[in-house]
Image (cartoon, coloured by chain):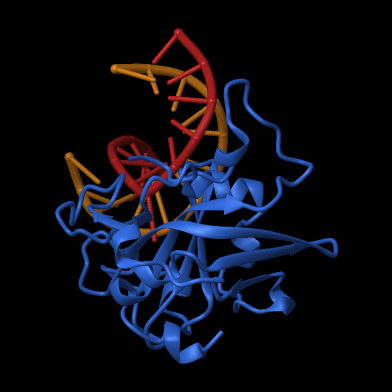
Chain colours: A blue, B red, C orange
DNA sequence: GTCCGGATCACT
DNA sequence: GTGATCCGGACA
């Protein structure tokens, strides 16, 4: 994928990431998922982890475009962000949901859980694809075992819904969440 | 040094 | 609505 494409503001990149494919390679096997839900976080956004200052935990969000920022939330889930914009600018797109092509063997389906919702949520998709802090700061490339592929077909504007972000207390009115309309793998309507 | 709450999720 | 379970960073 074109590097410059990610070297832009997160709120421009986030809707365009919908329909792209995230690939995770584990022990020689590639697992693919189409991105169906994203959120943008930027330098002047109080909800962004890098808003206050750079720390050891969040430094990856200040990294090169095309790298990733992975953090632990609520003591038990990881969240994956694609770092955007220029280096030293804290800006990233949170990947909130994937439509997985195939379900990895280690994933246990919940009793009432549908197979197409195994990666419906930022914590769930990281669990399904074994994404954790080990990947924090890595570049999206085959060497890292995690990369992006361009979507097959361009989504129409009418297929994308834009709304406010989920689970935050700051910047609650900023409409920087996007998802593919009526897609079963979207985390929440 | 202590302690609160978080870009979550499953279950009631 | 609540519990599970970690740890960064504000100092409640």
Q: Where A188 sits versus A50, above or below?
A: above
Q: Quadrant of residue A157?
A: bottom left
In the depicted view, which residue is nearer to us: A145 or A90?
A145
Residue visible at 22% across and 52% down? A164
**Residue A106 locus on image (x, y percent):** 77, 41
Q: Is residue A87 left or right of residue A124?
A: left
Q: Residue at x 31, y 80 (%)?
A: A9
Residue B3 is left or right of residue A119, and the answer is left
Query: Which picture quadrant has residue A175?
Result: bottom left
Q: Position of residue A122 (x, y in %)?
A: 48, 49
The residue that appears at 52% across and 68% down in the rendered structure is A20
Q: Is residue A34 above or below residue A122?
A: below
Is A9 rendered above or below residue A184?
A: below
Quadrant containing the C terminus of chain A is top left
Residue A28 relative to residue A75: left or right: right
Comparing B4 with A171, the one in front is A171
Instruction: Residue at 47% x, 70% y: name it.
Output: A82
Percent across and percent down for residue B10 are: 54, 25
Q: Quadrant of the N terminus of chain A?
A: bottom right
Query: How many numbered tags mark residues here?
Result: 0
The residue most toward the left is A173
User: Percent from the top left, x then y, of residue A153?
Assistant: 51, 71
Answer left or right for A80 relative to B3. right
């Amino acid at each position: 994928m074109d590097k410059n494409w990610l070297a832009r503001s997160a709120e421009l990149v986030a809707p365009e990431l919908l329909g792209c494919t995230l690939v995770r390679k584990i022990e020689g096997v590639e697992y693919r998922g189409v991105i169906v839900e994203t959120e943008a976080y930027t330098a002047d956004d109080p909800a962004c982890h890098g808003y206050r200052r750079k720390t050891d935990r969040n430094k990856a969000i200040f990294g090169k475009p095309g790298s990733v920022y992975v953090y632990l939330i609520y003591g038990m889930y990881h969240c994956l962000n694609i770092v955007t914009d220029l280096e030293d600018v804290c800006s990233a797109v949170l990947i909130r949901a994937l439509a997985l092509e195939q379900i990895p063997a280690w994933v246990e389906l919940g009793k009432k859980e549908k197979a197409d919702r195994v990666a419906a949520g930022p914590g769930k998709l990281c669990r399904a694809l074994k994404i954790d802090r080990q990947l924090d700061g890595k570049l999206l490339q085959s060497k890292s075992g995690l990369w992006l592929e361009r979507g097959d077909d361009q989504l129409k504007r009418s297929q994308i819904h834009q709304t406010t972000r989920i689970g935050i207390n700051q910047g609650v009115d900023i409409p920087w969440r996007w998802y593919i309309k009526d897609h079963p793998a979207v985390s929440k309507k």
